[in-house]
Amino acid sequence: MATSNNKKQMNESPFLPLEVFFNILLCLPAEFLFNCGRYVCKAWAQIIRDPIFIKSHVLMSKSGLLIQGRLPQNFLFVEIKDDKLQERHLKHNFPGMLLSGCRGLLLFYLPDPCKSAFRVLNPITMQEEILPFPFGTFRGDFRCYIVYISQTEEYKVICLYSKARPLNWDVWTLGIDREWRSFFAPTYDSEDILSSVSVAEVVYVTVKPTNIIAINLVIEKFGFIELSREILTLPYLCVDVKNTLSFLVKQGANACICVLRDLEKQELVKVCEIKDTFRGMDVSSDRFASIGWLENNWFYVFQRRLSGHLRNNRLEVYDQNIGKARA
Amino acid sequence: MSSSTELTEKKVFLLKSLDGVIFEVEESVAVQLEVIRELIEGDCARPFISLYNVTSEILALVIEYCKHHAETCSGGTSATIADEDLKTFDNEFMNVDENILLELCSAADYLDIKSLFELTCRTLASLIKDRTIIEVRKMFNVENDFSVVEEKAVRKEFAWAFK
């Protein structure tokens, strides 16, 4: 009798405490949590919804890049697996055009004025916050970023307008603000935003080649960076390298990535050079898009639209180990 | 009496499983079980430690795991070789029946062995990664406690995501 009881116990899985489930679910990809995990039982759904779980899951996740294709529903997730670049097409249908992403949250733009404007989405839980259009009748171009403020554990969305006089921007703190808060830089006209990038908690905008406006989203103040270096008179793009403001500078067919090591001394350090890939290409045009870094900054991913092939967006990756770019 | 002093000298501890089997383990192994380390430090580890949630079958495996990890770490091999060795051992160690794996995970949680707990969680996660909702429920022996209305509500909440 005792043995049969024992046997029965062995065949039945032990009931695991919630903290065990919590830890198992942490090891699973967001896709599983979304398509399967949250329907298993109420307790699992509760765990997956829990902000502490969400935060831990984001911290566990490996870095990859989410890239939107030409069609809004084409999403590609690029990551490094076993030293090889792997791409995966995602099944989710995301709500619009991907503008920016930060620590697990994605910022989308929906160009339909009837349906609100921006959606901030957590792709794991599919929770979202909808933000209205910040610009009444504004018809120009804009740049938008989502930024994580670690001190206050808040996310902020910033929207900058080009061709605006003076240069102005709006800020929205997620979960707190009910409307956009407006800021402007009095002496600056944003005839064209040449380049902009969000680096940690700061958004950098260049309007003139040697002048960069730095908007600190922690204290919500801005300042100017003057760059006198000759190198920056060449066409360049602001990029983020390991949370430092850096520049992708084009010189003929080559381009190099320079990190701004010391602002006071105006010290630029060249970290890598991408050869023979940039012939006849204008990095500041919309044919070129800098996408980001993978795996400890060994891989730099960028996208370009080949001339004459409007449908052909080519994704290229520069591998610092072998010093070459490949498609 | 004499055997007891000998035990103290070798610093050996006795662990008693749920089904009454007693295991003799050295201190280097015992301290990997965080629960037991606390008992040892509090001097509550005599004459033996009863582990009410762990069967002898599982406890034997847990001890095997801790023994291997203790030996590999204290052996004079270089860190990279030890790392490789532990990786191979862990992989083979996880090559067990699903039910055993679940019990190991539960035991590692109860005994507070961080590395084994993480290992079993990772292994279980990779097992269920490609399974259906029904298969996952069956494996963990959990019931679907959603009512039809509740399940619909979860789906409806993010309806656009399924278009």
Image: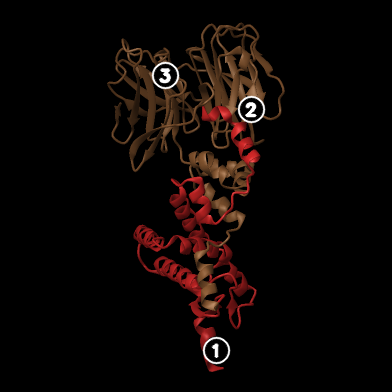
Chain colours: A brown, B red
Q: Nearer the viewer, mark 2 or mark 1?
A: 2
Find disc 1 in the rendering and name its residue: B5
Q: Residues within 10 Å of mark 3 (few under 14, many from 20)?
A: few
Q: Secondary structure at mark 1?
A: helix
Q: Are marks 2 and 1 on the same chain?
A: no
Q: Residue at x 50, y 64 (%)?
A: B104
Q: Which mark is residue A158?
A: none
Q: Is residue A117 visible?
A: yes
Chain name for mark 1: B
> In the image, residue A183 lies at what x, y percent?
66, 16
Indicate the amino acid at tag 3: Arg
Quadrant for the N terminus of chain A in the image: bottom right
Mark 2 → mark 1, Cα distance in angstroms? 67 Å
Q: Residue drawn 61% across and 6% down? A: A165
Marker count (numbered): 3
Q: Are marks 1 and 3 on the same chain?
A: no
Depth order, front residue of B163/B149: B149
* Quarter assignment of residue A76: top left
Q: Is residue B108 above or below residue A128?
A: below
Q: Secondary structure at mark 3?
A: loop
Query: Going 53% across and 93% down the picture, which residue do you hit?
Result: B2
Q: Residue at x 61, y 12 (%)?
A: A113
**For residue A44, side relative to residue A209 (left or right):** right
Question: What separation in Å lies between label 2 and label 3 (alpha carbons)?
Answer: 25 Å
Determine crowd level at label 1: few under 14, some 14-19, many 20+ residues with C-alpha closer than 10 A: few
Q: Amino acid at mark 1?
A: Thr
Q: Amino acid at mark 2?
A: Glu
Which residue is labeled 2 in the image?
A: A129
Task: Give percent across and percent down for residue A176.
Answer: 71, 28
Asked whether A285 or A7 is in front, the reply is: A7
Residue linked to disc 3: A70
Counting residues from the start of the chain, the first of labels 2 and 3 encountered is 3
